[in-house]
Image (cartoon, rainbow, N blue to C red):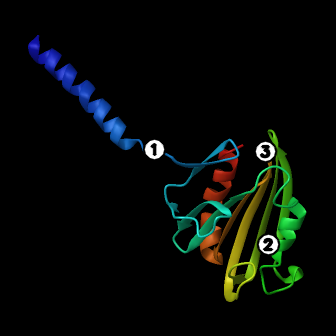
């Protein structure tokens, strides 16, 4: 009888320990009362500017999150045009795709573009980054729009896109 109790206790403890170590706590960030989950492959880094609410790296890909509050940050269309303007090539040569849809209580505008990305601060010197891509989402919601943008080498952005899209949906 004692051996059966000890074995049962051991199995219960073993089950609890192995299951708790197998679970991973999801990485998250919170913006405008919304919590977003990010892939485990994303590494949080200190935002490089006060305008950024969060910033991540996924290998050579950079993911940045902006939030300015209600009535700030500009319209989705203005930001899409500004983001497309961060490429050297004209819009027609970027194979840019813009999609707008309503999900739950938010309107999401998603943009994808590929070309020579002009990296640098808005008013500073730019460095041309050929064969780069960008995927961005503007989430129009209560409290103001949330801007999430991913840039990096085209191949790496393409690989990171499913995780990016999943992150967007997780906060809706």
The numbered mark, 2 or 1, whose residue comes first in the sequence reads 1
Residue 160 image position (x, y, % from top left): 60, 64
Q: How many marks?
A: 3
The answer to which quarter of the image holds residue 98 is bottom right
In terms of depth relative to the viewer, which is nearer, 17 or 124? 124
The numbered mark, 3 or 1, whose residue comes first in the sequence reads 1
User: Which residue lies under the disc numbered 1?
Assistant: 25
Q: Is residue 37 left or right of residue 67?
A: left
Judge the density around disc 3: few (<14), some (14-19), many (≥20) Cα neighbours within 10 Å.
some
Element type where label 1 sits in the image:
loop
Residue 168 image position (x, y, % from top left): 69, 52
In terms of depth relative to the viewer, which is nearer, 72 or 5? 72
The answer to which quarter of the image holds residue 106 is top right
Element type where label 2 sits in the image:
helix
User: Which residue lies under the disc numbered 2?
Assistant: 83
Judge the density around disc 1: few (<14), some (14-19), many (≥20) Cα neighbours within 10 Å.
few
Are the two marked residues, 2 and 1, in contact with CB atoms closer than 8 angstroms?
Answer: no
């Amino acid at each position: 009888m004692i051996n059966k109790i000890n074995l049962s206790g051991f199995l219960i403890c073993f089950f609890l320990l192995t299951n708790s170590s197998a679970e991973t706590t999801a990485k998250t960030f919170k913006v405008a009362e919304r919590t977003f989950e990010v892939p485990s492959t994303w590494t949080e880094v200190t935002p490089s500017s006060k305008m950024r609410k969060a910033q991540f790296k996924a290998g050579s890909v950079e993911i940045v999150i902006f939030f300015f509050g209600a009535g700030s940050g500009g319209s989705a269309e203005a930001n899409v045009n500004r983001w497309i303007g961060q490429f050297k090539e004209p819009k027609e040569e970027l194979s840019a795709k813009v999609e707008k849809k309503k999900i739950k209580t938010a309107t999401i505008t998603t943009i994808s573009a590929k070309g020579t990305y002009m990296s640098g601060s808005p008013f500073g010197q730019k460095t041309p980054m050929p064969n780069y891509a960008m995927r961005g989402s503007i989430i129009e919601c209560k409290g103001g729009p949330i801007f999430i943008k991913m840039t990096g080498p085209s191949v790496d952005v393409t690989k990171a896109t499913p995780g990016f899209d999943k992150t967007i949906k997780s906060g809706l």
